[in-house]
Amino acid sequence: MTRFVLIVAIAALMVACSKLPETVATPPGPQIAPMSSASIAWVKPEGASLEAVFVRAKSENKPVFLYWGAVWCPPCNQIKATVFNRPDFIERSKGFIPVYLDGDTPGAQKLGTQFKVRGYPTTILFSPDGTELTRLPGEVDAVQFMQMLKLGMGATQPIKATLAAALAATGGTAPSLPVDGWNMLAYYAWDTDESQLAAKSDRPQAVQQLAKQCPPEFQDAATRLLLRSVVISGQEKSKGLDSAQALVTLHKVLSDPALARVSADILVNYATELVTTLTAAPGPDRTAVVTALNTALDRFSADPALAKADQLGAVQAKVSLALMDKPQGSKADLPADLVAQAQAAVAKADQTTTDKYERQAVLPSAAHLLSEVGLLDASDALLQSELPKAVSAYYHMLVLASNAKRRGDKVASLDWSEKAYAGSLGPATRLQWGSGYVSKLIELAPQDSARIEKAATQVIGELDAAPETFYERNRRSLEKMGQQLHKWNADGKNSVVLKKLTAQLNGICAKLPEADSARGACHGVFAKGAKKV
């Protein structure tokens, strides 16, 4: 399952502990209700507590599989279409309690804070007593996901204890850890860890050490850990990475199709990070590694065992590599054969993707690929033809807004952003889309104070005066909107509007329980925004 690079672009338009925290005492609520989907007995919690789920898990001595996602999210729809509908997953689900936690359901954002989940999708295995066993990788292919699910369900200790054992070597001797333990670390969902396995500041050194200490006979795990250490070191700009040796290893991986296939998700999703971390531009080292990467990416793009989104992602990675050292916005001089490859990949994806959930995952990514190679009209046409049949058309509208912005058409960009907000469903989604619309107005039409005030007033007016409204993604969306509004009022010319909005939000905050931390978070929305300006 690909990381979907377009999510980074869309984010500009819109605005995870080994042990469960102690349960906060709350009045008894409705009992959990099962939700049938593809023959899986999903449990969909009602309210901000999973206490009933873990009571059941203990009584049945079953682990808990927690899926955190959203209806609109492309990678979430990808996992639905390629993993959750697999007969072996459906059969294995009988051995655990499957919990489906949608970010828009009541109490979901508070549960998100409790379990330290942010990015959609996140999948976590818990033991029956509530101990977090591991976070499963959402980027690998379905077969690899199922292998890690099997290992997780058979684990005799939490992944945190496995990490400690792996790092316990002294004198350069590899610790006594079986291959399954190394594989769980190598395939761990580092991107959605949320500092549960390692603090962000410690993560680069931890993964570097894992890569050094993994026994070479465990080649697949050792390779993935090395590549992951390069990516994380580059992202965090940390020291300690042996770049020269890592580059040698990367070339070895790329020259071995079977070894490269094991780490296809990393090579596709982090192609540019691998290159920029290990080479200087321009230079022969960079040229050589990009050439080798492109050869591997061509294999992935034609690999029928990979999901359609992953095949498409391989072509997207080639485009990202081609644009890597060019000024931002340079599209015209892309090689004609690469543009043609992108067009062919999009046409194939459109023609062969029939599952509605998979289309929700694939088509926006395909449209983004067309946009990246400069084919904005073709991207728009693909998206607009998909709108009537999309699972969540409002997500596609954000890509249309992005395309309009690329053209310099501010009016159309804002209109599509407004339509996306108007069509969005679910409280968390509407808050995210609405705050994003306000931010886009401030960016593209700062002079239109009436439209900005109207949009921000609507966003605040839709807030439910309940504690769960001010947790996790909701709180971050509001804080970002507050920050943008304060920037907009940097010269004091919009202070009247800001005062009105602050008073409106304070009215919501006053309805929250005094003892609940959500009240402070609510009052802090605009205060934090002011401090960040």
Image: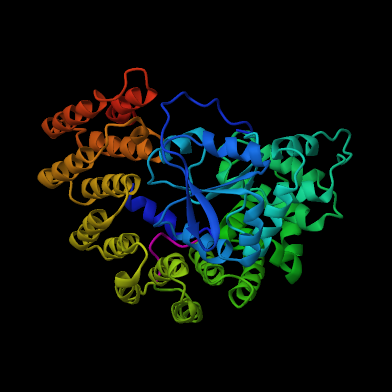
Residue 454 painted magenta: no
Residue located 48% across and 24% down the image = 24
Left of 312 or right of it: where is 451?
left
Determine whether 200 is above or below 274 in the image: above
Q: Nearer the viewer, residue 421 or 416?
A: 421
Residue located 61% across and 71% down the image = 306
Magenta span dominant secondary structure: loop
Residue 508 image-quadrant placement: top left
Can the viewer see residue 44 in this picture? Answer: yes
User: How far across and down, in percent of the image, does residue 251 sit?
Assistant: 73, 63
Residues in magenta, as a range: 325-331
Residue farthest along the top direction in this orientation = 515
Left of 409 or right of it: where is 467?
right
Can the viewer see residue 234 in this picture? Answer: no
Residue located 25% across and 25% down the image = 511
Determine whether 253 is above or below 98 in the image: below
Residue 292 image-quadrant placement: bottom right
Q: Quadrant of the C terminus?
A: top left
User: How far across and down, in percent of the image, does residue 512 sit?
Assistant: 29, 25
User: How far across and down, in percent of the image, does residue 32 sit?
Assistant: 47, 42
